Image (cartoon, coloured by chain):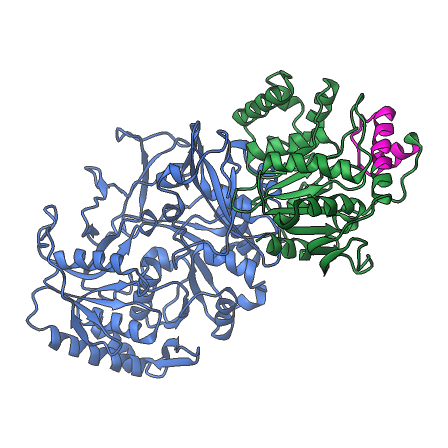
Chain colours: A blue, B green
Amino acid sequence: MRRRIADTAREVPGVPALIGFDEGLAENVLAWREFGTAVESAAQALRTALDGDERPCVVVLAANTPAAATGIAAALAAEVAVFPLNPGAPQAERDALLRVLGRRFGAVHLLDDEQRPHRVELPHSDHPAHPDHPARPGGDVAYLLATGASTGLPRISARPGPLRYDAARTPSLVIRQTGWRSGQRQLIAGPLYHAAPFTAFVDAILDRNTVVLAPFFSPQWTVELIRRYAVEWVQLTPAHMREILRGADPDPADFASLRAVLHTAARCDADTKRGWIELLGPERVYELYGATEGIGVTLARGDEWLARPGTTGRGVLTQVRVLDDRGAPVPPGTVGTVFMRTPQRVGLADYLTGHAVRTTPDGFATVGDRGRLDRDGYLYLEPREHDIINVGGEKVDPDEVEAALRSHPAVVDAVAMALPHQTLGSVVGAQVVLHPDVTVRRAELAAHCGRRLAGYKIPKQFTIVDKIPRTASGKTQRWRLTPDHPDDHPDHDGGATRQ
Amino acid sequence: MNPIVDEATDVGYQRPRDPVELWLARQWQHVLGFGVGIRDDFFGVGGNSLDAALVINGVLEEFGIQLPLNVMTERPTVAALAALLREQNARVTGPLLTIQDGDGSKPPLFLVHPVDGQLGVYGHLAQALGDEYTLHGLQAAGFWAGTSPLDTVADLARAYLDAIRAEQATGPYLLGATTSAAAVAHELAVLLGDEVRLLAVLDDDLLEPAPGPVSSDPVEALAVWRAHDLVPEDTSVEAAERMLRVRQSIEDAVRGWPPRPHPGVLDLFTTASGPSTVDLPAAEVRVHECAPDDQRLAVALRELIG
């Protein structure tokens, strides 16, 4: 990494490496020459400062700023394990994550804006080391990523290092298939503390690209940045894509420079998907399914998706198997647990937190997602189990309910969740954000859903809210919305609750 | 780009047209959790078989009528089910009928009927205010065979006062009426005195424009009402006759009434073209100018209800 950055700074010194923005949104361009110098001096300083530390790890408050980006690159160049931390994480969550790191690393340092490390004093823990994870034998950690944000349980997975530039593998073959080109201009729209933007950033640095680093997400501004900097490649989340369609009224001409939009993170509703395919043409819209754990990936280009709506594509250098609960393969069309195997796997991505990736003796692994394959090997995912709403034995996919609600002209955003119900166990509830100055009857929202969904999927309760809490990558944290105690929602006459 | 077209556009809110529809719509609201119009499809808005059983049970308790268990599939709208109930002589007598159950967070609003004696137009108000508001209505007597209307403001106010006290024993009270029968609410306010926190008078046109002058001939009147969807399809000429009689007695009562001064504030909601004063004496009259179908009425009223 260090060598690669130095080579790039020497060979293309004048090319922008990083286009960032300050608080006043003034542009801040770092050419490769300057970026290389900044990274090199920070990496050297880091090595000096951490010299003598047993197994150090640095934590970067990963706002999408040039300072944070430089810090991440410097740590990678210095070959010190780096963890990008959500700067907005609540104190309790931050403490929990730092404690996890403290169990694994000899010293945890927080990097400041000048890339200087400050050792974090961690409270003494009752669990000095996880019994399943003794000090790691051999192999260094390049970076660590928090995952599992949608379950509420912080997990950290580790990517073995050190990182090296390899023309055949940087970025991975699957990413190359999404229109990625060495030296491209790319936009990082998501937060650097999330897996997909982070890895896209790391690959961009290794591949001599120009990174446009958006400090926050705004639909109009994203379109403007793509247009202004003639961005060629961008990774977005379905929520980003939805908001751009809704909020920015984009013109195909704005995206003339784009070779590809890659989306990941959550399932994309069909309306949003079609909207983008219409905007860019099917050859420029890619969907990638692959967990942070790196056990394999599937990829679906827009034309494949049009032919098989809802698919997340076929495995790329990945074998996909769907197994039943006893581990036996199920026939095409039958739902089971999705296992994948890939030779590209760079080593076992392990959890620091004791969450296991289930594996089979022949090397297939799963993160627990459910799905089915069609006869041609295209994968269709089921919603994750913890999201499913069980209405008297009927399974309701909240994504489907949300998509129905969002297709109503008055609705900007919606989230569906389970509400406790005396007889049925649970019913569907919805929080809905309306366009400003618009009112809509709840019965009309229900009827609108009723025209698209089976009756038991129609929300029984609608709450109009100003904003849906989402993570920066656009995932809804439904567990934050679902009431913990049924008593919070007294049942009126055994019928629906209301707010 | 990517226009969103609703394949079956919303029929919009359609208010109840008679006391049975009013009662049934509120029963549905109770079961479903949100207000419905009389042509919303029960299952289409998420009602399930358990909910249907609750409606059927409510009908049994209120009217003593045992409906077949599949009745909701056969008659999945308020309008259709109300017709069946009327066939079986279901009667909704008042005077106090709950138009909408709120969530208990807001004090209830007591609304005196307009000049026709019925409460259906307040369905629009309930929709505009939102599900959290409780609206009770005071309905005139005389709509059913063998009953007769009251014909003085004093008698009307006295009957409604008793009904309000039975629902809520002590103040503060929030009262409302439309201009066409505002005298009754005004008299109620005088009787309740300083227990009244709000006396709101709404221009009739703000809730629903009238289809023109009402003929005194029941056949003609019925034809106009039917044409404007103001009465159920099965309304008989005899029923129309009784409706005209109720209207006439309220008009007479209001016309002959000498109002006494109301010691508090009167809030008048009117249109730009409507009257900016009202012939009802109050210590203070505040005029709120609104337009039909805009949010100002609901916004101002929500603020006054608190």
**Residue A16: % across, % down:** 37, 79
Res B5 seen here: no
**Residue B183: % across, % down:** 78, 46
Above or below residue B73? Residue A270 is: below
Check residue A13 for magenta coloring. no
Residue A381, quarter of picture: top left
Above or below residue B94? Residue A264 is: below
User: Which residues, given as a range, are shown in magenta?
Assistant: B220-249
Q: Nearer the viewer, residue A214 or B177?
A: B177
Q: Using residue A109 as the reference point, say whether residue A178 is left or right of it.
A: right
**Residue A17: % across, % down:** 35, 76
* Image mark count: 0
Q: Nearer the viewer, residue A483 or A79?
A: A483
Dominant SS in magenta: helix
Image quadrant in which the N terminus of chain B is located: bottom right
Residue B167, quarter of picture: top right
Q: Using residue A380 as the reference point, say whether residue A460 is left or right of it.
A: right
Q: Using residue A189 as the reference point, say whether residue B217 is left or right of it.
A: right
Q: Nearer the viewer, residue A376 or B36?
A: B36
Check residue B223 for magenta coloring. yes
Residue at 36 percent of width and 63 percent of height? A191
Q: Nearer the viewer, residue B89 or A475?
A: B89
Res A288 seen here: yes
Q: Using residue B104 as the reference point, say whether residue A70 is left or right of it.
A: left
Residue at 73 percent of width and 41 percent of height? B121
**Residue B209: % across, % down:** 81, 47
Above or below residue A21? Residue B302 is: above
